[in-house]
């Protein structure tokens, strides 16, 4: 499977409704910024990263794919995924200009495309290449009903509706004010009852003092985890919070490398591990994080930055993965979309990673790469 070409692409897909917001972001579209890897015999693999649909920023990623990473891949054997990951991730010239951010997002898109290509060529869904099916079901939790931009009454309605649809897990956003967020948390818990897991996500907004105050009021609501309570790189602060509250700490979507996770493990600053294949160096590096988490007996809940397409395969194949986020914005853009049935993700059956865009998505949402 000799690589013939690597072509970048950008899709901008509308979010649920006209706009959503958490404590730090407000967006109208999700960016699917990716790479198509084609072999000399005509096989194609697709991979992508996720952005807030910021076109100049997205074009920086596609420029990196086209000018930095693609030349290192043309003529290589696409089967050699791990070797090619090392060639790109440990390239001295690219390390000099960035070991995280744009270069990592570019690498993620390419790595996912290579895994998709390898599974497609083998005629099997990706989870079979990643080790086979290790669990019967992957439980889905719904985040799309929990944005801070949703009014209190609509938040409660959406949580009830999600439970009626079969979801056994809900996550709501916090980070506006402690008093408002506690009020919303208590209202949702009352609406969904004690059996449904209820997590919260601060998106790195609050100080340690705010987090401690919130946790004191939130413990009575049986919070499943507090995600990104503090600034993403504050290992010490997360360790202090983890020791001060009974609410488990979750994080990972803003960590770019396995090394970044290692320090959180070492400082006992994390209870739920949330790597993202679209923000780290793709599947290859996330597998390293999953293995490390498993060694520490820590559960993994992959962050659904790819809106679950690739993470469904990972979650069925790796024993550390226990639950998976559901945000449906882009699932209709793919020929083998992530589907939730009775509160669980369906086991993918089609060859590949489920990352091939539909012709309709290509026509409706494609943006210029330069």
Image (cartoon, helix red, strand yellow):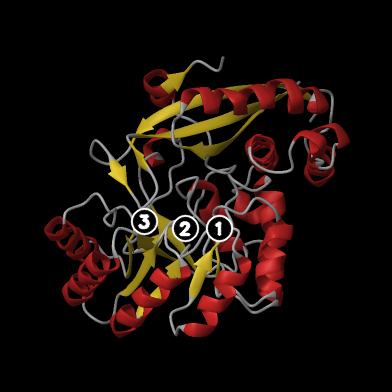
| Residue at which label 1 appears | 232
Report the residue marked by disc 3.
340
In what quadrant of the picture does the C terminus appear? top right
Please determine whether, in this image, residue 107 is positioned above or below residue 165: above
> Is there a contact, CB below 8 Å, between mark 2 and mark 1?
yes
Instruction: Name which residue lies at 27% across and 41% down.
Output: 16
Tell me the SS state at disc 2: loop
The residue under label 2 is 204
Q: Secondary structure at mark 1?
A: loop
N-term mark: 2 or 1: 2
Q: Residues within 10 Å of mark 1 (few under 14, many from 20)?
A: some
Closer-to-camera residue (117/327): 327
Residue appearing at x 49%, y 47% in the figure: 305
- Left or right: residue 235 versus residue 212 is right
Q: Which of pointers 2 and 3 lies earlier in the amino acid sequence?
A: 2
- Front residue of 1/64: it is 64
In three-dimensional space, the C-alpha distance between marks 1 and 3, rounded to whole angstroms, equals: 30 Å
Going by the picture, which residue comes out furthest to the left? Answer: 153
- Ranked by sequence position, the earlier of labels 1 and 3 is 1
């Amino acid at each position: 499977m000799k690589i013939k070409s690597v072509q970048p692409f950008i899709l901008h897909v509308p979010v649920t409704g006209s706009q959503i917001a958490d404590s730090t972001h407000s967006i109208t579209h999700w960016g699917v910024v990716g790479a198509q890897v084609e072999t000399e015999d005509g096989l194609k693999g697709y991979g992508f990263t996720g952005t807030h649909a910021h076109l100049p920023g997205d074009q920086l990623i596609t420029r990196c794919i086209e000018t930095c990473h693609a030349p290192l891949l043309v003529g290589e054997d696409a089967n050699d995924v791990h070797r090619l990951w090392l060639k790109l991730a440990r390239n001295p010239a690219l390390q000099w200009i960035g070991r995280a951010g744009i270069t990592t997002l570019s690498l993620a898109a390419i790595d996912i495309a290579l895994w998709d290509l390898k599974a497609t060529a083998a005629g099997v869904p990706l989870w079979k290449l990643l080790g086979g099916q290790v669990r019967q079901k992957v439980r889905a939790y719904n985040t799309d009903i929990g944005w801070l931009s949703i009014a209190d009454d609509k938040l409660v309605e959406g949580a009830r509706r999600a439970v009626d649809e079969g979801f056994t897990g809900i996550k709501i956003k916090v980070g506006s004010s402690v008093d408002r967020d506690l009020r919303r948390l208590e209202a949702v818990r009352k609406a969904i009852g004690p059996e449904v897991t209820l997590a919260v996500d601060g998106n790195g907004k609050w100080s340690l003092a705010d987090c401690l105050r919130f946790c004191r009021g939130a413990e009575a609501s049986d919070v499943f985890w507090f995600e990104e309570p503090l600034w993403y790189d504050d290992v010490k602060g997360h360790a202090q919070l983890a020791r001060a509250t009974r609410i488990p700490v979750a994080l990972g979507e803003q960590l770019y490398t396995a090394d970044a996770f290692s320090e959180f493990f070492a400082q006992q600053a994390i209870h739920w591990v949330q790597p993202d294949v679209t923000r780290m160096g793709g599947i290859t590096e996330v597998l390293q994080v999953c293995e490390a988490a498993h060694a520490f007996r820590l559960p993994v809940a992959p962050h659904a930055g790819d809106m679950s397409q690739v993470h469904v395969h990972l979650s069925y194949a790796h024993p550390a993965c226990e639950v998976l986020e559901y945000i449906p914005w882009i699932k209709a853009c793919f020929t083998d979309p992530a589907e939730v049935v009775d509160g669980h993700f369906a086991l993918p059956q089609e060859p590949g990673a489920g990352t091939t865009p539909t012709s309709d998505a290509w026509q409706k949402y494609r943006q210029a790469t330069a």
